[in-house]
Image (cartoon, grey):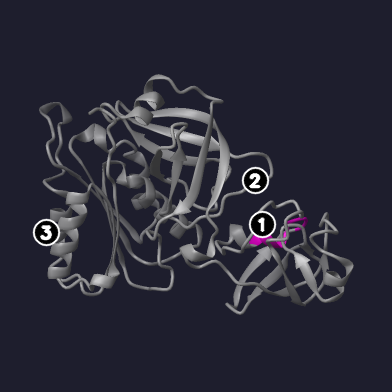
Amino acid sequence: MSFQITIQPSGHTCTSEHGETILRAALDAGYNLPYGCRNGACGTCKGRVLEGQVDHGSASSTALSEEDKAAGLALFCCAQPLSDISIECRELKTKDDIPVRTLPCRIQKLERLAPDVMALHLKLPVNEKFPFLAGQYIEILLKDGKRRAFSLANAPHDDELLQLHVRLISGGQFTEHVFNGMKERDMLRFEGPHGGFFLREDSSKPIILVAGGTGFAPIKSIIEHALHVQSQRPMILYWGARDRAGLYLPELPQRWAHEYPQIKYVPVLSEPSQDDAWAGRIGLVHQAVLEDYADLSGHQVYACGAPAMIDAARRDFVARGLPAEEFFADAFSFTSDTP
């Protein structure tokens, strides 16, 4: 049996299947409710049940007292609907709504995506979850006090493992360790989420996504989140790299474009080799956008890549009519520890 959950004051609705908690149902539907431990101990997810009945489950008495229950409060990570319900909860909509935390993690898997790109799959401690907005990044905390920032490549709902795309940088302390010394089950610490680069879901404008190299990582998170919440906004992805190997997950955007009519994919190479046998677009990735759009006034743009690409895209897109406030960007800077 399933029950409908209505979240107030937003009016969003979702469905809870038998045995599913309110929080899990909301997260699966793409609605970001505040939460922490997910086992009824911390009280972060406490909210009010306005209508209907719930089973409070394994809520701790220290986080949810009998007085709280009498007042209509519940821990949404534990509570399961027993009827159609209406709840009162402030959904997380901006980066300022999600607290920055420091957490340990374990390297669950190292996956070579290209000769110079490694995917890190990070496992959090049992019962620990890490809320973030699609497009945000984390900072790996190194033992010498230095930090290295990497965008999250997984969508917020796909949170069993956190995924990073790491490019090998010559002389880079951390990236060379990733490729030459890191092993599965190694432990790391990170802080996050960080960043104002995330999907603005309160707009209906068509979206242009521009990725340079591993700038594809947060773009992947944004697209997969949009698909998960069943957004019908038109999206066109321009992914640029120097050569064919730089488009290190080519089948994924091709599959998006094949399966979803609202998505188009334009790969662009700046310096294809003869061995690439490339018949696609050639040049700078932001120039490909300019070739296709004479007027950008009705669009939103999300761009991630090298600072030079971001600066050029911002300048040229605004000159084509894009409102400056509709350009969202994350500029990657690569750190080398070689003097």
In the picture of the structure, the residue carrying the numbered disc 1 is: 24
Sooner in the amino-acid sequence: mark 2 or mark 1: 1
Q: Based on the picture, tell me whether residue 171 belongs to the magenta stretch.
A: no
Res 313 → quadrant? bottom left
Label 1 crowd (10 A; few <14 / some 14-19 / many >=20): many
- Label annotation for residue 337: none
Residue occupying the point 46% across, 56% down: 225
Which of the two residues, 37 or 283, is positioned nearer the viewer here? 37
Magenta highlight range: 18-25
Residue 25: image location, x then y, percent: 66, 60
First in sequence: mark 3 vs mark 2: 2
Q: Nearer the viewer, residue 38 or 249?
A: 38
Q: Which residue is mark 2?
A: 128
The percent coordinates of residue 10 (x first, y second) are 57, 77
Q: Disc 2 to disc 1, how far (Cα)?
A: 14 Å
Q: Is residue 24 magenta?
A: yes
Residue 95 point in image, percent of width and height: 47, 62
Quadrant showing the C terminus: top left
SS type, badge 3: helix
Q: Which residue is mark 3?
A: 291
Quarter of the view holding residue 120? top left
Mark 3–mark 1 Cα distance, whole angstroms, equals 44 Å
Q: Is residue 184 above or below residue 296?
A: above
Say which residue appears at 45% left-offset and 34% top-offset: 142
**Amino acid identity at mark 2:** Glu
Occupied quadrant, residue 248: top left
Mark 2 in CB contact with mark 1 (< 8 angstroms): no
Q: How many marks?
A: 3
